Image (cartoon, rainbow, N blue to C red):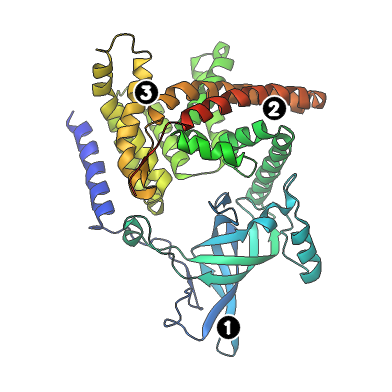
């Protein structure tokens, strides 16, 4: 009991120190080069970075405006000017790159941009040689942007500011000729082939692509907005629900091989999924939580869910402290903490109400809503009470949709003639989900500003 309480106290103390600014996170991976990596004129009035080279270190994700894709580039070289001199310098550290959507999607199925290809013909560059995925060695030309205005309620001042580079053209993109580079290339080609398959399924494919790979470029924008209005934004974020689903499917499929073999295969299925989907703060949290729970089970320990979440937070804190202030990180932990801590009292209250079914699901939704409401109020200026009812109603249907999608995708690859008939089945399920989401999205939000 003492050890369990110690873990919870340590996690709570670290969270308070970090989020109050009493213990700012160290800049472990600050970007360094001979050229000053800054856009502030007073710091280096005669110096400017014009070109950067490095390895794409995260999955590109479209920004809310839709004009750019954002990803992290691990620097290896920078070049630019200092006065009249041209300087080409080695570099290291992360830089956030904003890459134009028309260039990023020029190689995507159904997303070919004639303007981007015309620019490439005129300039001899622009469109990447390969689809940009994690692992690609990339050279881009552009400029460093000034730090953005802090609209996060003060959180941005507490964490180290990321350097942001606005890319204009891609001059080179290729994978390393090593075993790991070939593995990353294989992953990129798999994700591209999966995009092609999902594009053929229309809106259903767009939703399934977002659920399985985190890519949202084919997701119907109207439905995506209604998911958020209905309090279901967490469904589109890859997290523990997805790991539990893949693990459960593999366990069920391999149950005749024996308990130990089935457990190994389920872990392998989870790891392959994480490798394919790529790390996000919520998925990293889910993977640490999953592996810790498995380790505790194998060693005969029986930690509570709250203690397990606290241990996950501590490990995550030291593995990737730069993720601590991302919205998905905060919502992921506060949502689970609300379920583990507050759903019990909520269930006891609901149990007194006659015919309150399903009380467990509604209590879990209530716990998550109560815990995440302060966060959504700070970042979005609103609270979405619809999530109290929409989560238990829509989440099971989304699980069915994902299981059916995996089966239909496998059958489509084995028998290409089934691609469009199975796509019709998936679109029928999609319309059921979209209809429910539209209904719950009509519940008014509580606007705070």
Horizontal side of residue 353 vs 268, given as left or right: left
Q: Residues within 10 Å of mark 2 (few under 14, many from 20)?
A: many
Residue 371 has which mark? none
Q: Residues within 10 Å of mark 3 (few under 14, many from 20)?
A: few
For marks 3 and 2, the one nearer the N-term is 3
- From the viewer's perspective, is the residue at label 3 or at label 2 nearer? 2
Residue 238 visible from this viewpoint: no
Image vertical order of residue 260 relative to residue 307, above or below: above
Depth order, front residue of 83/104:
104
Whether tag 2 and tag 1 are in contact, CB under 8 A, the answer is no
Residue farthest to the top?
355
Quadrant of the snapshot with the N terminus: top left
Image vertical order of residue 55 relative to residue 252, above or below: below
- From the viewer's perspective, is the residue at label 3 or at label 1 nearer? 1
In the rendered image, residue 110, in percent from the top left (x then y), is placed at: 75, 45
| Secondary structure beneath label 3 | helix
At horizontal 69% and vertical 60% (from top left) the residue drawn is: 173
Horizontal side of residue 372 vs 237, given as left or right: left
Q: Which residue is mark 2?
A: 409
Residue 297 has which mark? 3
| Secondary structure beneath label 1 | strand
At horizontal 29% and vertical 59% (from top left) the residue drawn is: 24
Q: For residue 128, which quarter of the picture?
A: bottom right
Q: Mark 3 to mark 2: distance in Å?
A: 33 Å
Residue farthest to the left?
2
Q: Which residue is mark 1?
A: 81
Depth order, front residue of 233/334:
233
Horizontal side of residue 104 vs 35, given as left or right: right
């Amino acid at each position: 009991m003492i050890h369990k309480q110690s873990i919870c106290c340590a996690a709570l103390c670290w969270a308070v120190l970090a989020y109050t600014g009493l213990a700012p996170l160290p800049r472990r991976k600050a970007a360094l080069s001979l050229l000053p990596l800054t856009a502030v004129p007073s710091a280096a009035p005669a110096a400017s970075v014009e070109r950067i080279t490095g390895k794409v270190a995260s999955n590109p994700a479209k920004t809310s405006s839709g004009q750019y894709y954002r990803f992290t580039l691990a620097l290896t070289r920078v070049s630019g000017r200092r006065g009249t001199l041209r300087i080409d310098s080695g570099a290291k550290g992360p830089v956030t790159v904003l890459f134009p959507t028309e260039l990023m999607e020029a190689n995507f199925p159904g997303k070919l941009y004639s303007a981007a290809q015309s620019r490439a013909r005129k300039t001899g560059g622009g469109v990447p040689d390969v689809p940009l995925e994690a692992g690609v060695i990339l050279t881009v030309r552009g400029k460093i942007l000034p730090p953005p205005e802090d609209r996060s309620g003060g959180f941005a001042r507490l964490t180290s500011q990321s350097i942001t580079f606005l890319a204009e053209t891609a001059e080179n993109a290729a994978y390393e000729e090593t075993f790991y580079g070939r593995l990353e290339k294989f992953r990129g080609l798999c994700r591209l082939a999966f995009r092609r398959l999902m594009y053929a399924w229309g809106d259903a494919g767009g939703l399934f692509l977002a659920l399985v790979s985190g890519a949202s470029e084919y997701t119907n924008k109207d439905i995506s907005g209604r998911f958020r209005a209905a309090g279901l934004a967490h469904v589109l974020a890859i997290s523990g629900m997805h790991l539990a689903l893949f693990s459960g499917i593999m366990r069920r499929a391999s149950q005749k091989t024996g308990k130990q073999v089935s457990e190994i295969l389920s872990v392998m299925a989870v790891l392959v999924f994480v490798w394919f989907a790529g790390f996000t703060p919520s998925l990293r949290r889910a993977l640490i939580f999953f592996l810790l729970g498995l380790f505790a089970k194998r060693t005969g320990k029986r930690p509570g869910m709250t203690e397990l979440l606290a241990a996950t937070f501590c490990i995550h804190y030291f593995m990737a402290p730069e993720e601590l202030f991302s919205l998905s990180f905060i919502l992921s932990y506060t949502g689970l903490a609300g379920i583990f801590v507050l759903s019990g009292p909520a269930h006891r209250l609901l149990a007194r109400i006659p015919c309150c079914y399903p009380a467990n699901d509604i209590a879990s939704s209530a716990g998550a809503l109560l815990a995440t409401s302060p966060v959504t109020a700070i970042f979005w200026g609103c609270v979405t009470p619809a999530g109290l009812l929409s989560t238990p109603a829509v989440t099971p249907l989304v699980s069915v949709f994902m299981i059916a999608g995996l089966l239909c995708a496998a059958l489509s690859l084995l028998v290409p003639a089934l691609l469009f008939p199975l796509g019709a089945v998936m679109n029928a399920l999609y319309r059921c989900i979209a209809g429910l989401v539209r209904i719950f999205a009509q519940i008014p939000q509580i606007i705070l500003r």
